[in-house]
Image: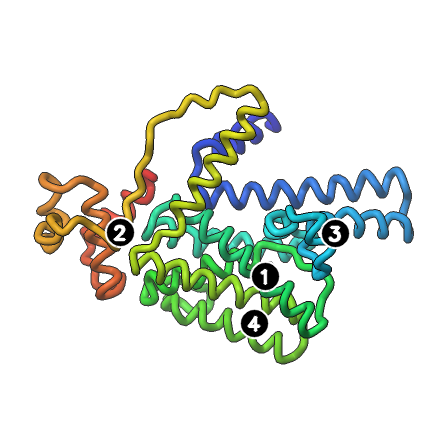
């Protein structure tokens, strides 16, 4: 059974969508941290020494408010956004990441999910660092919350009228769900409850909104981020001696900058375009319609086409 589970995880990490990969990475890091804590508990026993060792280890990977620590441990900017100590913190972040990340991936492409997550996480780290030093609140921060808030706000900007079903509330438009999350952060800041963390959430939210607005303006931040990540991946593969022979080149199209020649065809229904337009062009046409009139303006056939396309990504 364990071997089967491990094979499934490897399959998802290699070929799954980016939301699934991010969730698996966060869960794996959480398990690794607690396995390490348990090993320290067995070797050192319960007590102050065990707690101090655990705190020392975790702070090597958290976002520190001390600029000297940040200078000596620059990896904190990235590692903090994959690190959780509390189970409920992890569970809620991963649930929100799944809900909002799938919406982002379906509407603007799976290849933009990781850039939005990283952009939000970095913005959250910056907001925390500045607030901790200016307002003297908090010593370190950890968790995926800023990246998740970036995903949530990005989804709300992309499709504000997209409806999701919530327990006890029924169908609720996405913009209202995200608005409630932002209000909760503001209330927590006003009550001085984990102020640095909630300010980091707002930083991630701002990054998510700016990312999508820049995409609409024709500036796709995902392109340089993905290029950098590809180069880093090739570098680490070269260290391991893995072949770096380039594979097929993938070109990501910007849905907000479609060729002018296709504009006339995009006015046709998706059902009439199956024989004349490629699948990507049909997706672009639907995304343009959502941007102009909202998700609810799609007919049943267009919704079904977009859903089927998202399953094949």
Find residue 238 and report its image quarter: top right
What is the distance, in whole Å, between disc 4 and disc 2 at their CAs? 32 Å
- 92 and 288: which one is in front? 288
Q: Is residue 202 above or below residue 236?
A: below
Comparing marks 4 and 2, which lies closer to the viewer? 2
What is the distance, in whole Å, between disc 2 and disc 3 at their CAs? 41 Å
The secondary structure type at the circle numbered 1 is: helix
The secondary structure type at the circle numbered 2 is: loop
Q: Label 4 crowding class (10 Å Cα cut-off): few <14, some 14-19, many 20+?
A: many
The secondary structure type at the circle numbered 4 is: helix
**Dot 3 or dot 1, earlier in sequence:** 3
Q: Position of residue 184 (x, y in %)?
A: 55, 73
The numbered mark at residue 240 is none
- 8 and 25: which one is in front? 25
What is the distance, in whole Å, between disc 2 and disc 1 at their CAs? 30 Å
Which quarter of the rendered picture does the N terminus lie within?
top right
Instruction: Report if the CB atoms under discs 4 and 2 are less than 8 Å apart.
Output: no
Comparing marks 4 and 3, which lies closer to the viewer? 3
Which quarter of the rendered picture does the C terminus lie within?
top left
Q: Is residue 205 above or below residue 12?
A: below
Residue at x 87% of width, y 48% of height: 50
Q: Is residue 235 left or right of residue 266?
A: right
Comparing marks 2 and 1, which lies closer to the viewer? 1
- 125 and 297: which one is in front? 125
What residue does disc 2 label? 255
What residue does disc 1 label? 126
What residue does disc 4 label? 185
Q: Is residue 121 left or right of residue 75?
A: left
The numbered mark at residue 59 is 3
């Amino acid at each position: 059974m364990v071997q089967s589970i491990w094979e499934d995880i490897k399959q998802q990490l290699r070929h799954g969508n980016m939301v699934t990969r991010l969730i698996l990475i966060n869960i794996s890091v959480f398990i690794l941290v607690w396995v390490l804590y348990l090993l320290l508990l067995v070797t050192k026993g319960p007590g102050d020494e065990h707690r101090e060792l655990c705190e020392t280890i975790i702070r090597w990977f958290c976002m520190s408010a001390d600029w000297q620590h940040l200078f000596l441990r620059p990896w904190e900017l990235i590692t903090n956004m994959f690190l959780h100590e509390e189970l409920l913190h992890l569970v809620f972040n991963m649930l929100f990441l799944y809900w909002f990340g799938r919406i982002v991936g379906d509407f603007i492409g799976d290849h933009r999910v990781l850039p939005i997550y990283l952009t939000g996480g970095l913005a959250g780290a910056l907001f925390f660092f500045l607030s901790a030093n200016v307002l003297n609140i908090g010593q370190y921060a950890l968790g995926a919350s800023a990246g998740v808030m970036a995903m949530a706000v990005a989804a709300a900007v992309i499709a504000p009228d997209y409806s999701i079903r919530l327990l006890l509330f029924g169908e609720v438009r996405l913009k209202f769900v995200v608005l409630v999350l932002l209000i909760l952060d503001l209330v927590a800041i006003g009550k001085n409850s984990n102020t640095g963390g909630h300010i980091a959430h707002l930083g991630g939210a701002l990054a998510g909104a700016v990312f999508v607005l820049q995409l609409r303006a024709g500036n796709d931040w995902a392109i340089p981020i993905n290029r950098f990540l590809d180069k880093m991946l090739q570098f680490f593969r070269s260290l391991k001696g893995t072949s770096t022979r380039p594979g097929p080149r993938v070109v990501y199209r910007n849905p907000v900058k479609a060729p002018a020649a296709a504009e006339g065809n995009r006015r046709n229904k998706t059902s009439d375009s199956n024989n004349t337009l490629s699948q990507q062009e049909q997706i672009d046409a639907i995304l343009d319609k959502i941007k102009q009139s909202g998700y609810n303006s799609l007919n049943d056939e267009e919704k079904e086409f977009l859903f089927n396309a998202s399953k094949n990504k």
